[in-house]
Amino acid sequence: MRANHPLFPDKKRRTSAPLYTPEERRRRDSSVWTLVQGVLAPVQFVVFLVSLALVLRYLASGEGAALATASIVAKTITLYAIMITGSIWEKVVFGKWLFVPAFFWEDVFSMLVLALHTAYLVMLIGGLGTEHGRMLLALAAYATYVINATQFVLKLRAARLQTSADSPNSAIRPVAA
């Protein structure tokens, strides 16, 4: 096995290496894409909460299918927006579009989130499955989104702890979500 391979990271390196080098932190802090990610992440979360409520309402009562469907499409659009801009953010900060070591597992799981949301759209556009089945797929997509969002929140916390350990007066900006 190759040392420092993304699938088999060296545990010692992973726990002791900083999330960002000083140059990566400078690029992160000066990039407009950091601000874009910081705005899109909470917007996507609000869209998710509204959509989750509408999907659960539909599944519990059978009412509001059109509104729940529209909310899932809106959630998927916000997901695509944050994925595209997050990839740009990684390129600006780390020099690579996706799967940089610092965010490897977050990106892997993001692909699953994206695949499930895309499968929902394919089913919807293609008229595949039942409304109920598509709503259950949306719930599965939402469950993966919650896990992925948690990964990024934990990474943001790690970045903040690193920055405060390096310099207590440093400005903190959000990482990709």
Image (cartoon, grey):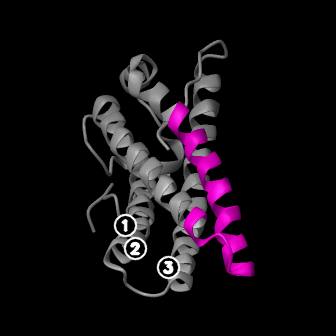
Q: Quadrant of residue 86?
A: top left
Q: In the image, residue 77 lies at what x, y percent? A: 42, 51
Question: Badge 2 is on which residue?
Answer: 124
Q: Secondary structure at mark 3?
A: helix
Residue in view at x 28 percent, y 69 percent? 1
Which amino acid, mark 1?
A: Thr
**Relative to residue 59, is residue 169 depicted above or below?**
above
Instruction: State the separation of the CA atoms marked 2 and 3.
Output: 7 Å
**Relative to residue 149, is residue 117 depicted above or below?**
below
Which amino acid, mark 3?
A: Arg
Q: Quadrant of residue 145?
A: bottom right
Q: Secondary structure at mark 2?
A: helix
Badge number at residue 118 = 1
Residue placed most toward the observer, 12 or 92: 92
Residue range corresponding to the magenta coloring = 39-67
Residue in view at x 53 percent, y 66 percent? 69
The answer to which of marks 1 and 3 sits earlier in the sequence is 1
Q: How many marks?
A: 3
Instruction: State the separation of the CA atoms marked 2 and 1.
Output: 10 Å
Of labels 2 and 1, the one closer to you: 2
Instruction: State the separation of the CA atoms marked 1 and 3.
Output: 11 Å
Residue in view at x 50 percent, y 44 percent? 177
